[in-house]
Image (cartoon, rainbow, N blue to C red):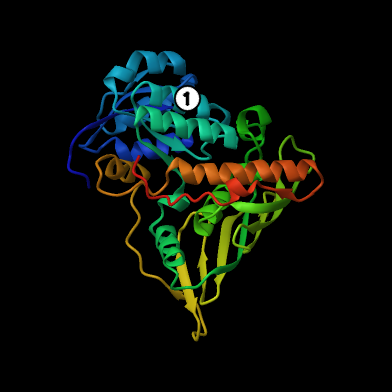
Amino acid sequence: MTDGQITRVGFIGTGVMARTHLAEMVGRADTAVVAVCEPSAAAYAQVVELFDRHGRPAPANEPDWQRFVATFAAELDAAFILTPHAFHFGQATACLEAGLDVLLEKPMVLTAAEAEALIATRDRTGRLLVVAFQGSLSPQVREASRLLRSGELGPILNISATAWQNWSTITIDTWRQQPDLSGGGFMFDTGAHMLNTVADLAGEDFAEVAAWLEDDGRPVDIRAAVIGRLASGALVTMNACGSAIPSCHSEIRVFATGAILKTGIWGESLEIQRAGATTLRKVRAVAGLPVWEQFLNVRSGRIPNPSPPEVGLRMARLWDAIRESAARAGSVVRLPATVATVTGTGSAAR
């Protein structure tokens, strides 16, 4: 728990994921959900019902997000943004400009240019921006990153990642398969966790990328394969299948000169096999905390920001390269050296 100081928050978007977070937040003594922005009357009705179940008055609703910021910013300390991907940049920028700290649902933005502009706004306003990527927020990924950065496992040689889900069927007729709202398909939705966690574990940008995106007759990509080389020379493969049988799972293996690490795209576990050992062994890590509680802990200065926009920028650069390569039938895209050598530690609090 935090120290009990009340943080006044507004929600932009109250879909299924937002209501999952709200269910964990509504009873907290250190949190006041002041207002929400939800254009869907049906979705807002479910928010009202959720608060009724907890015996709490429902927050006010302003359906237009721009009016929401103008109306409620003075009454808020923070905004939690959970909207279709295409809205993230504009909404996060407006909230930072209004003096609010921001917890932003993944993926952070659509392009590297948007990521760079958002970081500039963060720096200029001095506000906090945390990206709600479960992988970067996971204690297991933070421990894996610490081990890899410490040098005790030796240099990274290869990274292999796979993610699969019956995404193509369960997202039919939703905004997730509308390119103008989603910015991509399976690889940029569920697969965004893979892109982010791989980029976080790698600790450096990609130097070269080749990619193929297959839409299987849908408006967005459903399957993807990516091959990349990091600036250090380490090789990376990422395989995303959004047409799997009913299921949702993943695996990431990092091969270093002194060990093999195994985790998932959400950082749900961590195993290690060091040189001389014959099997993987689980690594003990502290229990994970809800996303909102981690945000409060970062905001109060108790912990460094585990998922800052710098990691989101690295992922955005990778996604730009993936789309460019796929548009050129898998041709290799070479990232400028000045980009490929940029480091983002993931430790900055603001």
Can residue 215 be seen here? The reply is no
How many dots with numbers?
A: 1
Q: Is residue 228 left or right of residue 308?
A: right
Q: Quadrant of residue 102?
A: top left
Q: Nearer the viewer, residue 188 or 302?
A: 302
- Residue 336 location (% of width, % of height): 65, 46
At horizontal 76% and vertical 51% (from top left) the residue drawn is 332
Residue pushed farthest right?
Answer: 329
Q: Is residue 33 left or right of residue 264?
A: left
Task: Tell me if residue 157 comes above or below residue 312 in the rendering.
Answer: below
At horizontal 60% and vertical 43% (from top left) the residue drawn is 317
Quadrant containing the C terminus is top left
Q: Is residue 329 left or right of residue 53?
A: right
Can residue 127 be seen here? The reply is yes
* Amino acid bearing label 1: Gln
At horizontal 49% and vertical 46% (from top left) the residue drawn is 311
Q: Residues within 10 Å of mark 1 (few under 14, many from 20)?
A: many
What is the secondary structure assignment of the residue under circle 1?
A: helix
Residue pushed farthest front?
Answer: 338
At horizontal 74% and vertical 34% (from top left) the residue drawn is 219
- Residue 55 location (% of width, % of height): 25, 30
Q: Nearer the viewer, residue 337 or 48?
A: 337
- Residue 61 location (% of width, % of height): 38, 18
Q: Nearer the viewer, residue 214 or 318?
A: 318
What residue is pinned by disc 1? Answer: 91
- Residue 295 location (% of width, % of height): 33, 42
